[in-house]
Amino acid sequence: MAVGLSKYKNVILYGYSDELYTLTGAAKEKRIKFYNLGRRLPKGDSLLASAIRPYLLFFPLLKAIATSRYDIVHIQGHCYLFFLFVPLIKLKRKPIYWTMHDVDFRPTNTGIRGKLESLQVKLLCQNGWLASKVNAVIVHGSKLKDKLISRGLSASKVFVIPHFDYRYLLPLSSESDFNNSYSEYVLLFGKIKPYKGVEVLLDASRMVRKRVGKNFKVMIAGKGRLSYLNTLVRNDDLEYIHLRNGYIPDTEIPELFRRAKFLVLPYVEASQSGVVSLAYTFSKPVIVSNVGSVAEYVDHGVTGLIFEAGNAKQLADYIEDLVESNNRCIEMGKNAYNKMNREMSLDMCCAYLNELYNGSLI
């Protein structure tokens, strides 16, 4: 986003990764100044690291807000303790914009860890209060806007912008490689969380395996708790389902997607998902459940297929259809890439954001 906005404004970017700063092309832009907050933070996802990470962010952010010269503040996602800075920003008469990726927070873990995650977000992010104080809230879907309005937020304050493309990853491999003639597996990609519907995909995959046979393969790639995955995956599943449990560096995403036939997003709950934009970037169709705003960016039968959340039988039918229809899969992948260029591009989204910043949309 910083790269897209730098066409219109100078950008001070506070992020967590030197690698992403370089990979996205932001490091080449003279109008972007980057500060890596990640160097100050503890690594890992232990309870201790999760507990102290928000407080280690407080003072560098306070210094930035108090001493930097800026016209606009734009925060992304659940920004811990940011609500404490709102009075200072308002005192400086600077507008605040907030991209709310998840209208409802969904924890990474189950049980007590999941409850502690939810409590931490509720106490340290103050979502409802913060939404009422910012100048505008950006969400990635019309259903998400409707949900915020139903909770009392003014419709004139909520704006819908698609989750834009990941085109910066394409130079890491030949763009012409991303077609389904090289496909090896069905891909579920992203952090493995309870709401992602892994069990629905597993149930559907077992049905497809019986129908299609040994040529059917599934890749589940992303970081998740091994104890959680072990409760879902059976030993016989591992004959055709490969688990790549761990963080996937951006540099490895192109090869992972090149080898995928299509992606499945079997979520049982969700606000939206950047995985749709990511799949479209690599000309891959998607099969998604009809939860949240995920399906808003899928043209059924054109760029992907939409199934009823939790319906493993319907998902199995759609998976079998695409697995056995290679030409259709390739055509849908081309449609997906074209839709991304036409409706979800970084340039288009940032041009809209710039209009929002300039006050022409409020």
Image: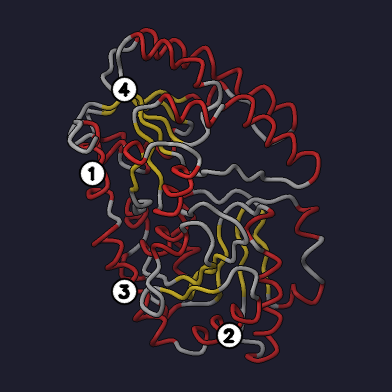
- x, y percent for residue 301: 40, 80
Task: Kindly identify which residue carries mark 3.
Answer: 335
Which tag, 4 or 1, sits closer to the chain's start? 4
Residue 352 got which mark? Answer: 1
Which tag, 4 or 2, sits closer to the chain's start? 4
Query: Mark 4 is on which residue type?
Result: Pro
Q: If the image is split into quadrants, where does the N terminus sit?
A: top left
Which residue is pictured at 40% across the width and 49% down the height? 140
Task: Kindly identify which residue carries mark 4.
Answer: 95
How far separated are the C-alphas under marks 2 and 3? 21 Å
Query: Mark 2 is on which residue type?
Result: Asp
Which tag, 3 or 4, sits closer to the chain's start? 4
- x, y percent for residue 78: 53, 33
68 relative to 328, above or below: above
Residue 317 got which mark? Answer: 2
What crowding class fits label 2: few (fewer than 14 Cα within 10 Å), some (14-19), or many (20 or more)?
some
How far separated are the C-alphas under marks 1 and 2? 39 Å
Which residue is pictured at 28% across the width and 28% down the height? 32
